[in-house]
Image: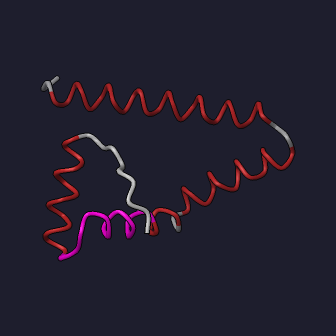
């Protein structure tokens, strides 16, 4: 089993630690369970299939466009979270 650290924001780390305690498992076990559940989700399956198709056909423009869209969405999510923490 790999033992490399995964860096997450302190807030996420605390939530995972608390949830793991409540569920009676370690944070690593909880992370593994969450990843397996996400990997089976329709969202992940669609995303993975899209990247597979783009790579298989050599459509790097589709790959970069999808990555740009994800980066923009993540930036918007971070901005919204930051505003929420400041009460705006």
Residue 8 image position (x, y, % from top left): 30, 44
**Residue 27 vs residue 62, the one in the foreground:** 27
- Assess whether residue 60 is covered by the magenta stretch: no
- In the rendered view, how is the structure colored? secondary structure
Q: Is residue 41 left or right of residue 58?
A: left
- Assess whether residue 25 is covered by the magenta stretch: yes
Please tell me which residue is depicted at 78% across the width and 45% down the height of the picture. Answer: 55
**Residue 82 vs residue 10, the one in the foreground:** 10
Magenta: main secondary structure equals helix
Q: Which residues are magenta?
A: 24-35
Please tell me which residue is depicted at 70% across the width and 50% down the height of the picture. Answer: 50
Q: Is residue 38 above or below residue 51?
A: below
Which quadrant, please, contains the N terminus? bottom left
**Residue 8 vs residue 87, the one in the foreground:** 8
Q: Is residue 31 left or right of residue 38?
A: left
Please tell me which residue is depicted at 46% across the width and 68% down the height of the picture. Answer: 36
Residue 60 image position (x, y, % from top left): 78, 34
In the rendered image, which quarter is residue 58 located in?
A: top right
In the rendered image, which quarter is residue 63 located in?
A: top right
Please tell me which residue is depicted at 14% across the width and 69% down the height of the picture. Answer: 21
Residue 28 image position (x, y, % from top left): 31, 64
Q: Is residue 20 left or right of residue 43?
A: left
């Amino acid at each position: 089993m790999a033992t490399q650290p995964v860096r997450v924001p302190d807030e996420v780390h605390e939530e995972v630690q608390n949830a793991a305690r409540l569920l009676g498992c370690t944070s690593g076990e909880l992370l593994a369970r969450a990843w397996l559940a996400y990997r089976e989700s329709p969202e992940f399956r669609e995303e993975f299939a899209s990247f597979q198709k783009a790579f298989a056909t050599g459509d790097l423009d589709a790959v970069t466009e999808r990555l740009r869209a994800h980066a923009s969405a993540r930036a918007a999510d971070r901005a919204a979270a930051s505003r929420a923490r400041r009460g705006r």
